[in-house]
Amino acid sequence: MGLFQYIETSVENEIGFITLNRPKQLNALNRTMVGEIVSAAEEFDRDTQVKVILLSGHGKAFSAGADIDEMANDNPVRLELLNQFADWDRLSLVKKPIIGAVKSFVFGGGFELALSCDLLIAAGDTLFSFPEVTLGVMPGAGGTQRLTKLVGKTKALEWILTAERINAETALKYGIINKIVAPELLMEEAIAFARKITAQPSLAVRMIKDSVNKAVDYSLYEGMQYERKNFYLLFASEDQKEGMAAFVEKRKPNFTGR
Ligand code: CO8
């Protein structure tokens, strides 16, 4: 694993941990930090010791958004040449499930980072918001698209136009998060959640993530065809043979991830 300045990484029990580490700035995301998050996720994606990636933040909050100091003097040409959002695109190519464990402020780019995760566990004190409008801008790392696809146009527009802070209960109600947990149990609960996935055969997990994500972009017909190919592909795996043999023999399967 590469050396990082703004994040910490570790591997334990088949979980690859990525922890945002700029707590004094409430984990405000500068460009280097986003690059580090993506690089770490890509390394974990290739690491056979890792089955699930768990993204969280040190300190009080998950992330208060993009680093405002860094972008205050930006101009369109510099932004075009920087092409910083290409990093965010790479994150969506990661094949292993990414679980976000979020708390307190999940604002702006921090909310977009959370929406880039596959599953979200939130502490009861979590507040989600897109405050960009109050800065004279708008979400730029997928917020207007991902939130709208998730909750529909009506609420997405209301929340992004007003910068309203959405609490964990509302986020759960609208399907933004999977689960609310007590703040002091956030990591424990997120790890327990991750372990439920690490216990599954990893090729099937991979194909499920891939197929479900296609439902967001594809028509139903295209998505069904895509699902079918992934279903067929899994019959080339040893884990399919083992899983079904174990069922027939009434024993626990021993999955190898192949
Ligand atoms: N950028 C830079 N520094 C920040 C940010 C930020 N987004 N958020 C907090 N900080 C810093 C503060 O400046 C402060 O630093 P210092 O101690 O040196 O003064 C420190 O973190 C602690 O913050 P506060 O004292 O403000 O803490 P409070 O608990 O009083 O308030 C808030 C917390 C409400 C979260 C407040 O900090 C706040 O409003 N922050 C800004 C939130 C915001 O507007 N975020 C959206 C940014 S725009 C964006 O995300 C665009 C995304 C598109 C591109 C994504 C690319 C990465």
Image (cartoon, rainbow, N blue to C red):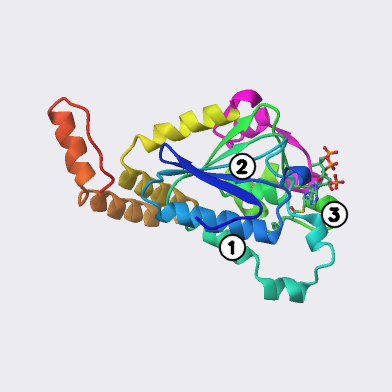
Visible residue check, residue 106: yes
Asked if ligand 1 lies within 8 A of label 3, the reply is yes
Tell which circle, 3 or 2, labels the residue nearer the N-terminal end.
3
Mark 3 vs mark 1: in front: 1
Tell which circle, 3 or 1, labels the residue nearer the N-terminal end.
1
Q: CA distance from mark 3 to mark 1?
A: 23 Å
Visible residue check, residue 148: no
**Relative image position of residue 101 (x, y in whole percent):** 59, 37
Query: Quick check: is 161 in the magenta stretch?
Result: yes
Q: CA distance from mark 1 to mark 2?
A: 25 Å
Asked if ligand 1 lies within 8 A of label 2, the reply is no
Q: Residue furthest front?
A: 3
**Relative image position of residue 156 (x, y in whole percent):** 69, 45
Magenta-highlighted residues: 157-185
Mark 1 vs mark 2: in front: 1
Three-letter amino acid code at the position of disc 3: Leu
Crowd rating for badge 1 (residues with CA inside 10 Å; few <14, some 14–19, many 20+): some
Determine which residue is flagged by label 3.
Answer: 135
Query: Quick check: is 213 in the magenta stretch?
Result: no
Query: In the picture provided, is 181 more to the left or to the right than 218?
Result: right
**Relative image position of residue 96 (x, y in whole percent):** 43, 49
Determine which residue is flagged by label 2.
Answer: 151
User: In the rendering, which numbered label is found on residue 87?
Assistant: 1
Mark 3 vs mark 2: in front: 3
Three-letter amino acid code at the position of disc 1: Asp
Tell me where residue 251 sits by quadrant: top left
